[in-house]
C-alpha cells in the first residue's frame, strides 16, 4: 500500500514539474514592502516575479498570493482523476499578472468543424479577479477561440487548507464540464438555424456598440474601419460555415481573434472576451425564443 502511494506521489510530482516548466510558470510571487524615495514605508506592498523581478501589482498588507505551484498542483491532481493534457501560460504586461492552466477534453464536431475543448482555470496576481474555472473552445479550421467563464464562482479563500481547496476545485471543475456540455448543445443548435438580417444587425449593434440612428457620415474613420473588419469577418465565416447562427457567431470570434488580434489575455478577460460573450448571449437568446434550447442546466 505504501509503495503504491509513493508511486502516485512520484507521478504527481513529475507531472507538476513538467507542467510548471512547460507552461513557463515555474516562478514564485514575492511580496515586498514599498517605500517612498526618502525611505518611508507606504503601507503598500509590491508583488514581483521571483525569477526576473518583474513587477506584477501593488497590494495591501493582508493580501496573500496563491502561488503558481499550488494552482498547477490542483490541476495535476484533477488531471490524474479525469485524464487529459495540461497546457498554460502567464499573461499580462509583464507576463505574470494572470496565469492560466487548461485541461483538454475530447474533441467535438459541429457540422464538420472540429472543436478543441478545454476546461480553463484562471488566476490573477494583480487582484483583478479571483480564481475561476471556465470553458475554452477553439475551432480548428479557423483557430477561433471562445472562452466562457462560469457564473457565481465559488471563492478560494487563502485561509483554506490544501484539501479544502482541492475539494472546491474539483467541484468547480465538474460544474465547468456541465457548462462545456451545454455549450456543445448550443453550438449544435446554432448550426441548425439560419441567420436572418434582423439577428445579424442585432449582433453587430450590440457587439460593435452602434447606434442605429447614427448617420454613416458622422461615424469616425476608426469606427468605419472596425465595422468594415467586422463585416468582412462575418462574410468570411458565412462562406466557410454557412449562413447560420453558427457562422454568425464564428464571424464574431474571427473578428476578435484575427482582426483585433490582441492575444489570449484579451480573449479571456479583456474586450475580446466581452465582445464574444455579448454575441453568444444575443444568439443564445434568439435560440431560446425559437424553442431550440430547452432544459439546459445553467452554470
Image (cartoon, rainbow, N blue to C red):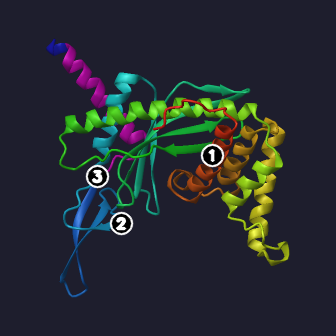
Q: Residue at position x 80%, y 55% from top?
A: 231
Residue 109, x across and y down, in percent: 66, 25
Residue 29, x across and y down, in percent: 29, 56
Image: magenta residue range:
4-27
Was residue 5 drawn as part of the magenta stretch in this picture?
yes
Q: Which of the marked residues, 2 or 3, is nearer the chain's N terminus?
A: 3
Q: Quadrant of the N terminus?
A: top left
How far apart, in angstroms, are the residues tagged by discs 2 and 3? 12 Å
Disc 3 element: loop
Q: Residue at position x 38%, y 56% from top?
A: 129
Q: Residues within 10 Å of mark 2 (few under 14, many from 20)?
A: some
Residue 256 lies, with reference to residue 289, above or below; the image says: below
Q: Which residue does the numbered mark 1 point to in the structure image?
A: 280
Q: Are marks 2 and 1 in contact (CB under 8 Å)?
A: no
Q: Which residue does the numbered mark 3 point to in the structure image?
A: 28
Can you name the residue that lies furthest to the top here?
A: 1
Disc 1 element: helix
Amino acid at each position: 500500500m505504501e509503495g503504491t502511494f509513493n508511486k502516485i506521489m512520484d507521478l504527481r510530482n513529475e507531472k507538476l514539474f513538467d507542467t510548471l516548466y512547460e507552461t513557463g510558470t515555474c516562478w514564485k510571487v514575492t511580496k515586498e514592502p514599498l517605500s517612498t524615495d526618502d525611505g518611508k514605508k507606504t503601507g503598500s506592498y509590491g508583488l514581483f516575479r521571483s525569477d526576473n523581478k518583474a513587477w506584477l501589482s501593488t497590494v495591501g498588507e493582508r493580501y496573500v498570493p496563491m502561488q503558481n505551484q499550488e494552482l498547477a498542483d490542483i490541476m495535476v491532481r484533477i488531471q490524474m482523476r479525469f485524464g487529459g493534457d495540461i497546457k498554460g501560460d502567464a499573461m499580462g504586461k509583464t507576463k505574470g499578472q494572470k496565469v492560466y492552466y487548461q485541461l483538454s477534453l475530447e474533441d467535438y464536431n459541429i457540422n464538420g468543424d472540429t472543436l478543441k475543448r478545454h476546461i480553463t482555470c484562471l488566476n490573477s496576481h494583480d487582484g483583478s479577479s479571483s480564481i475561476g474555472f471556465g470553458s475554452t473552445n477553439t475551432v480548428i479550421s479557423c483557430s477561433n477561440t471562445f472562452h466562457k467563464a462560469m457564473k457565481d464562482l465559488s471563492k478560494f479563500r487563502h485561509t483554506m487548507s490544501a484539501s479544502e481547496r482541492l475539494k472546491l476545485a474539483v467541484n468547480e471543475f465538474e460544474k465547468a464540464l456541465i457548462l462545456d456540455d451545454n455549450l456543445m448543445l448550443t453550438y449544435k443548435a446554432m448550426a441548425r438555424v439560419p441567420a436572418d438580417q434582423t439577428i445579424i444587425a442585432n449582433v453587430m449593434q450590440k457587439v460593435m456598440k452602434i447606434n442605429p440612428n447614427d448617420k454613416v457620415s458622422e461615424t469616425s474613420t476608426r469606427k468605419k474601419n472596425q465595422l468594415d473588419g467586422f463585416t468582412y469577418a462575418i462574410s468570411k465565416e458565412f462562406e466557410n460555415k454557412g449562413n447560420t447562427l453558427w457562422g454568425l457567431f464564428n464571424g464574431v470570434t474571427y473578428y476578435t481573434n484575427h482582426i483585433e488580434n490582441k492575444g489570449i489575455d484579451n480573449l479571456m478577460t479583456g474586450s475580446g472576451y466581452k465582445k464574444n460573450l455579448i454575441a453568444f448571449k444575443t444568439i443564445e437568446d434568439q435560440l431560446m425564443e425559437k424553442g431550440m434550447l430547452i432544459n439546459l442546466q445553467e452554470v
